[in-house]
Amino acid sequence: MVKPFITRDTYERAADIIRTQYADRPRIGLILGSGLSAVADAVTDPTPIPYERIPNFPRPSVEGHAGRLIFGTLEGQSVVLMQGRAHYYEGVSMLQIAFPVRVLQILGIEMLFVTNAAGGINQSFQVGDLMLITDHIGLVNMTGLNPLRGPNEASFGPRFPDMTRAYDPELRALAVAAAQEADIPLRQGVYAGVAGPSFETPAELRFLRAIGADAVGMSTVPEVTVARHAGVRVLGVSGISNIAILDPAEDRQASHEEVLVAGKQFGPRLIALLRGVLRRLG
């Protein structure tokens, strides 16, 4: 059983187990959201490690999340992919959600690329669009479920980390350039992180739109918070999987199935975008 607060020793033990199966140091971590597991197919010389082989690693139970680390090379960069993630709504704590990011930090990542499938609140968005995340609204963080709650581990970062530039401006500029080169339409906007698992009501979606959100999802914010606590640079991209239903009179309803279908639609563009960013890192 995972204790209420996790010590660095626990993260180190998980990292040591991983090193027995893959010794090289990854430079970049990538977290693949719902329906995006196929991105792992682009990795050269992949070394998969199922989450169940790693002590305390949270295992996703949602369709579209395979539950494996994939180590290898992508566009000449040493990478580790999280093929699926656990979510708060699955019954795990925020510390457990953050656990993989802490382990990747110990393994030596310098950058974290986070992806997700999100509902489009901005009415100019279309299903299949990619949205470069410029900032987020961490509603779960703001209501007391911040993954940094508890004793601060100073070896990771400060007690009160700055989140002004949570999504690295230089990495975002690389993403814009990569999208232009590959002729990929790239939206930009603010991601709202909620707990789930129920989809939002029309009133909740209108509230999120009013406070500045362009897309909404049930992940990403805890991972980004923990990454920035340790000084890891972050790039975030959402695939728009459905368009928000702002009026209950609309004859539509949201479902996870449409999220998975949309992932197949924007997945190839996301792979091309990530490849372009990695090439530009040199």
Image (cartoon, rainbow, N blue to C red):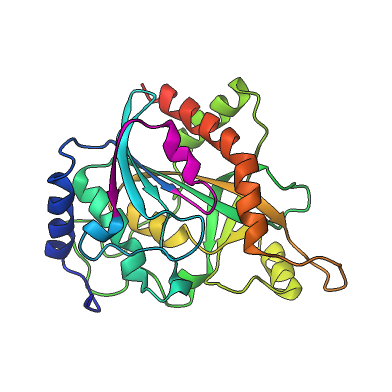
Q: Is residue 216 left or right of residue 72?
A: right
Residue at image point 12% right, 46% down = 20
Residue 277 within the segment the image draws in magenta: no
Could you tell me residue 131's position as x and y percent? 61, 44
For this view, does 262 lie left or right of residue 247?
Answer: left
Residue plotted at (22% across, 78% down):
1
Indicate left or right for 72 with 278 as reference: left
- Residue 6 sits in quarter: bottom left
The magenta segment is 32-50
Q: Does the rendering let one see residue 248?
A: yes
Q: Position of residue 276 (x, y in %)?
A: 49, 26
Q: Nearer the viewer, residue 254 or 116?
A: 254
- Number of callouts: 0
- Residue in the picture at 25% in, 79% down: 4
Q: In the image, residue 165 lies at what x, y percent? A: 45, 48
Pick the front one: 189 or 10: 10
Q: Quadrant of residue 72?
A: top left
Look at the picture and state if 126 lies above or below 257.
Answer: above
Looking at the image, is 85 positioned above or below residue 5?
above
Q: Is residue 213 visible?
A: no
